[in-house]
Image: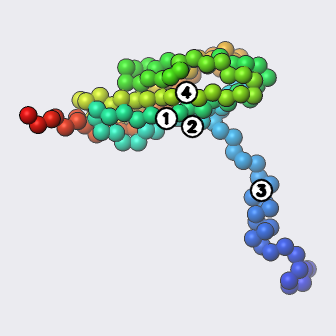
């Protein structure tokens, strides 16, 4: 039994325990050397006729370079660039944008198709979701 006043203060013990726990890794395709952050894109609520954007960060934890190609699956989605080679241990960013159509309203669920040359991860869908409030107001004449 420790005497009062001896040993580390309780808040330092808790801090030491928290620091000993490894930080969570970004989402990865299962069994893959690639991670994608954020793991999906929830753009929240948009007014019809407006845009939202996010940056997808891709980290290559593997020992070989990886080619990543991103293909929008609808006219409302765009990306730039659409293809990058990510060096071993390197990272790359893709800019994603969604345009909420003027006459659109309600829940939106779309995807980007992501193609890679990584064994076991040749393709997968990157989910995009949110809500569009619309239609957009008509200008007064």
Residue appearing at x 30%, y 39% in the figure: 47
How far is disc 2 from disc 1 in space, using C-alphas? Answer: 9 Å
The picture places residue 55, in percent across and down from the top left corner, at 53, 33
How far is disc 4 from disc 3 in space, using C-alphas? Answer: 32 Å
The residue that mark 2 highlights is: 38
The residue that mark 3 highlights is: 19
Q: Is residue 86 above or below residue 9?
A: above
The residue that mark 1 highlights is: 54
Q: Earlier in the sequence, mark 1 or mark 4?
A: 1
The picture places residue 141, in percent across and down from the top left corner, at 8, 34
Q: Residues within 10 Å of mark 3 (few under 14, many from 20)?
A: few
Q: Nearer the viewer, mark 4 or mark 3?
A: 4
The residue that mark 4 highlights is: 94
Quarter of the rendering containing residue 39: top right
Q: Earlier in the sequence, mark 2 or mark 1?
A: 2
The picture places residue 73, in percent across and down from the top left corner, at 44, 19
Quarter of the rendering containing residue 59: top right
Q: Are marks 4 and 2 in contact (CB under 8 Å)?
A: no
Q: What secondary structure is found at the residue carrying circle 2?
A: loop
6 lies left or right of 48: right
Q: What secondary structure is found at the residue carrying circle 1?
A: strand
Residue projecting furthest to the left:
141
Q: Earlier in the sequence, mark 4 or mark 3?
A: 3
Q: Earlier in the sequence, mark 3 or mark 2?
A: 3
Quarter of the rendering containing residue 77: top left
Q: Are marks 2 and 1 in contact (CB under 8 Å)?
A: yes
Q: Earlier in the sequence, mark 3 or mark 1?
A: 3
């Amino acid at each position: 039994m420790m005497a009062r006043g001896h040993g580390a203060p309780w808040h330092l013990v808790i801090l030491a325990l928290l620091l000993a726990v490894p930080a969570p890794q970004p989402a990865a395709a299962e069994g893959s050397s690639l991670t994608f952050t954020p793991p999906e894109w929830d753009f929240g609520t948009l007014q019809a006729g407006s845009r939202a954007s996010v940056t997808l960060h891709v980290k290559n934890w593997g020992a070989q370079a990886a080619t990543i190609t991103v293909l929008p699956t609808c006219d409302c989605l765009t990306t730039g660039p659409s293809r990058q080679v990510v060096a071993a241990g390197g990272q790359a960013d893709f800019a994603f944008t969604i345009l909420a159509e003027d006459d659109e309203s309600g829940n939106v669920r779309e995807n980007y198709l992501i193609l890679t040359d990584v064994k076991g991860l040749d393709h997968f869908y990157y989910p995009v979701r949110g809500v569009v409030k619309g239609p957009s107001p008509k200008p007064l004449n």
